[in-house]
Amino acid sequence: MSVKMEASAGKLSENTLMIYGIVVALVGTYLTYLNVVTGIAVFSFFGGIGAIAALWWGSDTIKHLCSYGLGTGVPSAGMVAFGAGAIAMIAGTKFGLASPIVTLVLAAIIGAVIGYCANNIINMNIPVMIFSLMKLSIVGALTMLGFAAMCTGTFMFNGLVIGGMTLSMEPAEVAAGGAQTFMVTVLPEFASSLIGGAALTVIFFLGAIALQHPFNACLGPNESQDRTLMLAIEVGFLSMFVVAVMSYAFLDITSATVGVVVSLIGWVYSYKQYIALSKRDAYAWLDAKPIMEVGGNE
Amino acid sequence: MEEIVLGIGITALAGAFATVAGAAEDTESDIGSQGDPNSQVQLAPQMGYIHRIFNKAISGEPPAYGAWCAIGAGVAWALMQVNFNPALAIILGSVIAVFVQGVYCTSGYLGRTASLAKFQQPVYIDIIKSLLSVTMAHAFVAIFCTVAMCHLMATALHHPFALPLLGLVWGIALGAAGSATGNPFYGKERQYQNQKFGAGVPISASGNIVRYAEAGQRSSLDNGWFTTKFAGPASGICFGLIVFLELWRTVLFEKMVAGWGAIIVGVILILIFTFIDRWIEVWGRKTYGPYTAAEEASS
Amino acid sequence: MSALGGAAAGGEGINPTGTLVGIVILLVSIAATYALGFSIIPLIGIIIGGAFVGFGVHFVPVGGAPAAMGQAPGIATGVAMLAAGAGLAGLFGGAWAFEATGDFAIAVAGGAVGGGLMMSITCMMVNATYVFAMGIPAASGKVAKDPITGDTFPEYKSQGTEGHGLPFISFFGGVIGGIVTGLGGTLIYLALLGIYETGLPVIMQAEPAAIQPLAISLAGIFAIGFFLVNAVLAAYNITGTIEGPHDPKFKRVPRAIIGCAVASAFCGFISMLIVLNTGM
């Protein structure tokens, strides 16, 4: 009485997707460092491109994991990926310029531990469980890191927790942590930052629902890999659009608008492609027509 | 004293927002056929029953509404950081969240239906054209009310969590409450309207959902109308009670009995609802009676 | 969400090697935390909280897709997210109680009561829907008599179904599930909050009062992450649907508790790295 799911064999193999996904995600996140090098924040949107690559790869991994029959459905895989990925990502941003790579390693380790618990302690005995959960945790962590870099312009911890500076009249010894400038102390403000204002929650759940959507939405006997992957890209650009709107709180107007424009162009293109692919795959594309009975049923 | 009066007023307003949000959420999820009942809509073509239902496959309601409310709250928070008026920020946040929700609706329908090509289920584009705006409108009401309620909690009631985090927490709770209360009504009463009333759907009837309505062919809009007759308001009451009582017991009783006042009241409330539930259960058994004669069974 | 694909291939009973390796990972996490100079009490709190979350999820009666048609008892929502909804509502109450009173016991009890209240209202409305709107009395498919009230079920089950609605034992299970998951979630949140409130001012060199919003948000985001991981692990253990504490599947609880404890221990250790003074 359940939907029979077959993992379709697509043109792109799992390993190809993994290599492309990791490389583009890391490169995209590192390209946001150009913000620091050049002093302008226009390069933030590369983080979003990196996150989309991670989502693109992740949607295929979910497909392979869920075809084994977990009993709980597809969305849970997305939730666990981002739950583990969030922990890895925030811990990983503490390591300066090496943060993206450390995030990847931490996510892989956390994913392996959770996968081990699921497979060997909870006895699920699914061959690909540990490796799939490792990959999904990496996807979750890299997606969050990419979007966080796009939103704030940096992938390092201090940038994610300090939202702005306020001025205090107290001298530096009393106003702890401030830097004494002429007659006033500059204090960092935490409540208006990405993590301090909990805006990271939005990225967390945006990613979680975006990761599981492509496979969940294209579920069925006629699922085709190119359509699923195109939906992953479309959903990625849509998430990028939301993150770009949120970046108005952290970046200047020009950089944020660049992000909005890039994400909207990407979204429109991938959405049109997805509709075209759905039209190609559908049995019939009808407008205002009645039910076409298969014959002989009621 | 004044603070408590203000707190009660805000609590009542939050409860009202929650009730509206719950009703709108359940109606939206039935117009778009989301969540567990949707598995029947998915199954029907495989058993040979072609239909014209809006098969919106976006995951269950709790994660979906968690995401939309988190997006709404997050964008509203970001806009408030650049000094937008809170009301305008919440409206704009809800608009963007609804835009995202609408796109997910269309991609869910197209994806699932295209993947059922083997069973000759066509994609009916007019379903999207006529129903998308309806489902987005209901979602807007639900999201706006939830985000406004969270904003009240954060600013007027001084909850320590930031707005986006509150949005996520209450979005997931909204989806869970609405889904639990409304799904059986839609799944059994409407999808299987042709089965006997007063009994569950037998396993042999799976997939044989109602496709021809009272007049013409069943459209998801009819399902939305049906939902508003009971399941929508019931979900609204459920979520409204949850939010109102959670806030009420804290605002009024937090400082009493050395801090344990709110907990004692909470336990009393749980016991009250347990009694009500037991009364409902016994009433059902006595009034409806058994389906068959009780067996002479040893315990 | 429907149960997908082939039959879940999980075996029954506890896997001794897996459990042993898991306990080793747990002990290594505790040792590593101690070696880095942190207090291990918050980590113990996180481990217990994670175990509670995993334990509580098994109490919640979930019927899945069949419940939506009146074919199976339970609530017609997914296991992990329904438990998450209850636990997060509890976390909301617990965090607020801690902010208002600063008392650990009150906060944890507040979280538990918040989760239980949400589940009791939800379960009551589910029964109201079944009885008043659909005309279907509650009946369990797994036992013939309710362990608490003594109601008999076979004659109240409609033909061709496995039961429907929420019999009192399932309602009771739901409320207990809400209480335990709320308790676990709040425990995790308070443990993390303690770590960050003491550790962050040191490494960021800021006033504790100023750092508080950051500590609360960090602890909140992490608590949700921990919650989702533990709830999904427990959902994997249940493989989809469970009627409540009287369901035979409930006997699988021990391995879920161990699994969640191990996962929480390791993730807790990683979350401590944030207040590690790496000099960066």
Image (cartoon, rainbow, N blue to C red):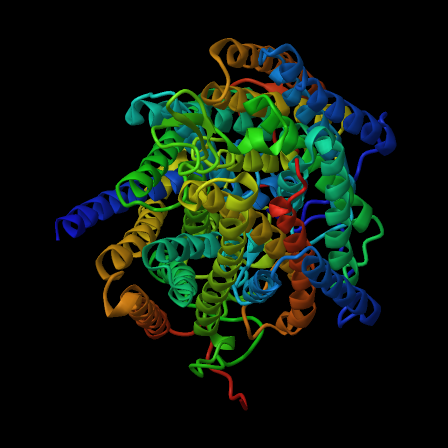
Seen from the viewer's position, the closer of residues C88 and A224 is: C88
Q: Residue C247 placed where, x, y %?
A: 59, 72
Which residue is drawn at the image coordinates 34% and 74% (left, top)? Answer: B282
Q: Is residue B163 left or right of residue A21?
A: left
Q: Position of residue B269 (x, y in %)?
A: 30, 66
Image quadrant holding the C terminus of chain C, namely top right
Judged left or right of residue A24, residue C198 is left
Residue at x-position 43% and y-position 44%: C212
Total count of labels = 0
Q: Is residue A272 visible?
A: yes
Residue at 66 percent across and 53 percent down: it is C267
> Which residue is rendered at x = 52% and y = 62% of the image?
C184
Q: Position of residue C230 (x, y in %)?
A: 62, 56
The residue positioned farthest toward the left in the image shown:
B2
Q: Is residue A279 above or below residue B183?
A: above
- Percent from the top left, x then y, of residue A267? 60, 16
A41 vs A232: above or below: above
Foreground residue among C58 and C37: C37
Image quarter for residue C203?
A: top right
Most foreground residue, C11 or C16: C16
Specify whether residue A62 is in view. no
Whether residue A112 sits left or right of residue C129 in the image: it is: right
Above or below: residue C18 compared with residue A192: below
